[in-house]
Image (tube, helix red, strand yellow):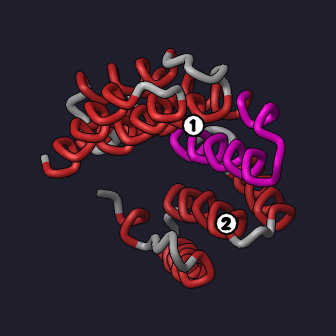
Amino acid sequence: MSALDDLWDYDDPAGSEKRFRAAIEDADARGDLAGAGEARTQLARALGLQGRFDDGHATLDTVEADHPADDRVRVRALLERGRLLRSSGDPAASATPFEGAWELARTIGEDGLAVDAAHMLALVDAPPGDQAWHRRALDLADTSPDPAARRWRGSLWNNIGWVRFEAGDLDGALAAFETALAARRE
């Protein structure tokens, strides 16, 4: 788990915002430009979870301007740009940044971030019942040596379970939820 993950409390995005602001100050003080950039992407996410979408987009604009050559920061910025668009009510527009995050993360070998992008594309890009992005995400999570990618398995199977449930496939949903539970325990 990354240090950024440790700063998150999704039930308290305002508290997370404070922790990310402190992490940015700390990274800036140490001259860690990439660390500050990554923390700013998570600040943007925390702002979005509070419904402060314009502030989140402005934060990402700064990140993109300050880190044009840092591919990992760019992947995170694309992911959070997509999440802001989706959360603010424009899921169709969110597909483009999520696709960019998927492609760039795959190119630079950031499997955990690539799985995150595929997970988000499964939520916004696929027609109901289409499992293509879920399959891509699971294939990568199952085969990657990256623990960050493998940790996604429980969430992905949970999402698949809900898709199956909503389609009326109760047996398939139960099997997916059981697989999700096993992955969480693992």
**In x, y percent, where is residue 164?**
45, 28
Alpha-carbon span between mark 1 and mark 2: 15 Å
Q: Is residue 94 left or right of residue 15?
A: right
Q: Can residue 165 be seen?
A: yes
Q: Mark 1: few, some, or many residues within 10 Å (few <14, many ≥20)? A: many
Give the crowd class for mark 2: few <14, some 14-19, many >=20 residues within 10 Å. many
Residues rendered magenta in the picture = 71-95
Q: Nearer the viewer, residue 86 or 101?
A: 86
Q: Is residue 116 magenta?
A: no
Q: What residue did someone put label 1 on?
A: 120
User: Which of marks 2 and 1 precedes in the sequence?
Assistant: 2
Q: Position of residue 94 (x, y in %)?
A: 74, 36
From this view, report whether residue 49 is shown above or below residue 146: below
Amino acid tagged 2: Leu
Residue 86 falls in image quadrant: top right
Q: Is residue 12 above or below residue 109?
A: below
Residue 81 magenta-drawn? Answer: yes
Disc number for residue 49: 2
- Residue 161 location (% of width, % of height): 39, 35
How many marks overall? 2
Q: Are marks 1 and 2 in contact (CB under 8 Å)?
A: no
Q: Is residue 180 above or below residue 141?
A: below
Residue 36: image x %, image y %? 56, 65
- Quadrant location of the N terminus? bottom left
User: What element does badge 2 sit on?
Assistant: helix
Question: Residue 43 or 132: which is nearer the viewer?
Answer: 132
Residue appearing at x 72%, y 46% in the figure: 81
Main SS category, magenta section? helix
For residue 105, say whether it is visible.
no
In the foreground, 68 or 19: 19
